Image (tube, rainbow, N blue to C red):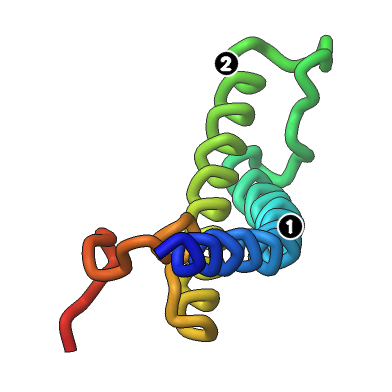
Amino acid sequence: MANWAVTRWREAAMLKLLYKPVAIVAGIVGGLLSGLIFNRVWKIVGRGSDAPAPMDSERGWGEILLAAGLHGAIYALVKTAVDRGAAEWTRKKTGIWPGGTLQQPDKSPDHRQA
C-alpha cells in the first residue's frame, strides 16, 4: 500500500513539474494577447488616441479609470480563457486535469463517465 501511495505522489509531482512550463507559456501568451486586444479596443473607445497612463496629467480621472477598468476586464477574460485552454490541452494529452486529481480521478469535478 505504501508503494502505491509513493508512486501516486511521484506521478502528481511529475505532472505539476511538466505543467509548469505550459502554465508559464500560457501566462506570457495571455499577457501579450490581452495587451494587443486592449490597444485595439482603446483605439475605438478612445477615438484613436493612445491609452492614458495613470500619471498622465492631461487626462481626467474618468478616462484614466475607464482605461484601467477596461484593461483589467480584458486581461482577466483573456487570462481565464488561456489558462482554461492550457488545462484542457493538458488533460487531452495526459488524461489528467492539472491540479492534483491523480489521487481520486473518479471523484474529481472534471471526471466524465464514458
Answer above or below: position of 88 versus 10. Answer: below
Does residue 102 appear to the left or right of 50 in the view shown? left
- Crowding at dot 2, Cα within 10 Å, few <14 / some 14-19 / many 20+, comes out as few
The amino acid beneath tag 1 is: Ile
Q: Which residue is mark 1?
A: 24
The reply to whether discs 2 and 1 touch (Cβ–Cβ < 8 Å) is no
Residue occupying image coordinates x 43% and y 67%:
97
Dot 1 crowding, Cα within 10 Å, few <14, some 14–19, many 20+: few
* Residue 28 or residue 53, whichever sits in front: 28
Mark 2 — residue? 62
Figure check: 2 above or below 92: above
Image location of residue 81, percent across then percent down: 49, 60
Q: Nearer the viewer, residue 98 or 35?
A: 98
- Give 8 or 55, whichever is nearer the viewer: 8
The residue lying at 70 percent from left, 59 percent from top is 20
Which amino acid is tagged 2? Gly
Residue at far left of view: 113
Element at label 1: helix
Quarter holding the N terminus is bottom left
The spot of residue 73 in percent (x, y) is: 51, 39
- Label 2: state its secondary structure: helix
In front: label 2 or label 1: 1
Tell me residue 24's x, y (percent): 74, 57
Inspect this view and state whether residue 40 appears.
no
Q: Is residue 41 left or right of residue 18?
A: left
Which residue shows up at 65% across the image and 52% down it? 34
Residue reaching furthest bottom?
114
Q: Is residue 28 left or right of residue 70?
A: right
